[in-house]
Amino acid sequence: MKPGWSGGPVLGVESSCDETSAAVVQDGRVLGHVILSQDAHERFGGVVPEIAARAHLRQIDEVVAETLTEAGVGPRELGGIGVTAGPGLVGALLVGLNWAKGFAWALEKPLVGVQHMEAHLFANSLESQDARPPFVALLVSGGHTLLLHAAAWGSYTLLGQTRDDAVGEAFDKVARRLGLGYPGGPEIERVAREGEPGRFKLPRPMLSARHTPADPAYFDFSFSGLKTATALLAAELESQGGTGLAPSVPDLAAEFQQAVVDTLVAKVLRAVEWTNCDRVLLGGGVARNGPLRERLSDALGESGRLYSPSPRLATDNAAMVACLAEHRLRAGEVAGLDLNADPSLPFPGLTPLDSLANRGVELRGAPCIPS
Ligand code: KG4
Ligand code: ZN
């Protein structure tokens, strides 16, 4: 493999869950991008790891070939290759990672491994030049719920995270309980349009007014209780006989979605107030949710700024991977052939809030203007 990057388009490969994707990015511009979502999981109501890994293996050659054709870039013209190294399903990750390693080795191109959640942070910068730090970010996907402050690329403070289910996971599980399809987020959003929030009452978790920024609960999330409360209401409706659960599904879905959005928006506003930074960036599959985007945008008002990715760049995709890889290669980073998949790869440069305070670093009042 080549020791370093000397310019040229970057190929990104993503296979951490159930999307096989490749993209070619140059100077933050997407030249080619293919995403193949696996629908084989639908009937199981969730991603089956073994099926995902096998599907990646079947699809990856074709996905990359199509991407290069779309980009009009031959393999030898590539400047480097970036691949998701984690977190994710280990079997799925290994397919993309080993494929990228082999490709980089054969073509003598530099390779870099990227962290999937950090890549979600970079998705917006493909569409908006000024979607760069400093900002407050809410990353909401099927596996993670993170609220962080980015002072600069690679320098992040973790303000809050979920203590149990990720928000996308809660959408998926509630949808399943209500007899809706997979993935659950878009299904709940669709059905909720026919319903009214408020007919049923669900909790707004971790929103106690007694908490102060010194309590971890001030910025943290929890969705497991909300999920159970929805399931209990569903069971109660089923046990009442008569028409059963079906006629109430739209109202239940609407109340569930409203409870999630209320919680997410409130926590983001706490972060905005605390960091004194009203530039907010959304990322991850749940960033597709219309009510979440609308409510956040309204809450930030005229003076604030919300960066939210277009639907294709919100859910898993390789363009965000290539964008982060280009950033990394430009900074001189290159992986060796010992690069391995890590299903729980930590978020690089992410410091927990309490250890920052212990070191006497003050985040509040830091300038909120991109440099
Ligand atoms: O980021 P992503 O594609 O994969 C992970 O890295 O997990 O996120 C997938 C998640 C799923 O849980 C899916 O239900 C959720 O994003 N999602 C949505 C919507 N579209 C996708 N959740 C709420 N509303 C949506 N419109
Ligand atoms: Zn993701």
Image (cartoon, helix red, strand yellow):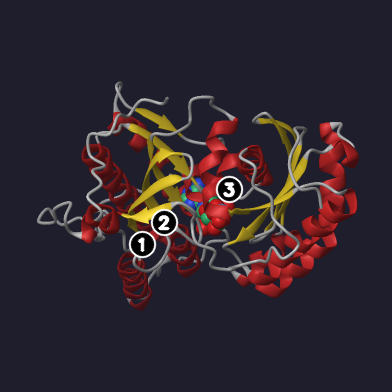
Q: Earlier in the sequence, mark 2 or mark 3?
A: 2
**Residue 333, percent across and down?**
64, 47
What type is the residue that disc 1 sits on? Thr
Mark 2: few, some, or many residues within 10 Å (few <14, many ≥20)?
A: many
**Residue 50, percent across and down?**
71, 74
- The Cα atoms of the two marked residues, 3 and 1, are separated by 19 Å
Q: Which residue is mark 3?
A: 315
User: Which residue lies most toward the bottom here?
Assistant: 239
Q: Secondary structure at mark 1?
A: loop
Relative depth, front residue between 68 and 200: 68
> Residue 304 is drawn in which quadrant?
top left
> Residue 86 is drawn in which quadrant?
bottom right
Relative depth, front residue between 134 and 219: 134
Residue 191 in sight here: no
Q: Residue at x 26, y 42 (%)?
A: 363
Q: Is mark 1 within 8 Å of ligand 1?
A: no
Q: Is mark 3 within 8 Å of ligand 1?
A: yes
In this view, 15 is above or below 91: above
Relative depth, front residue between 283 and 325: 325
Relative depth, front residue between 270 and 100: 100
Q: Quadrant of the C terminus?
A: top left
What type is the residue that disc 2 sits on? Thr
Q: Are marks 3 and 1 in contact (CB under 8 Å)?
A: no
Find residue 145 and name its label: 2
User: Which residue lies most toward the front here?
Assistant: 3
**Residue 154, percent across and down?**
48, 45
Q: Which residue is mark 1?
A: 162
Mark 1: few, some, or many residues within 10 Å (few <14, many ≥20)?
A: many
Q: Are marks 2 and 1 in contact (CB under 8 Å)?
A: yes
**Residue 310, percent across and down?**
56, 35
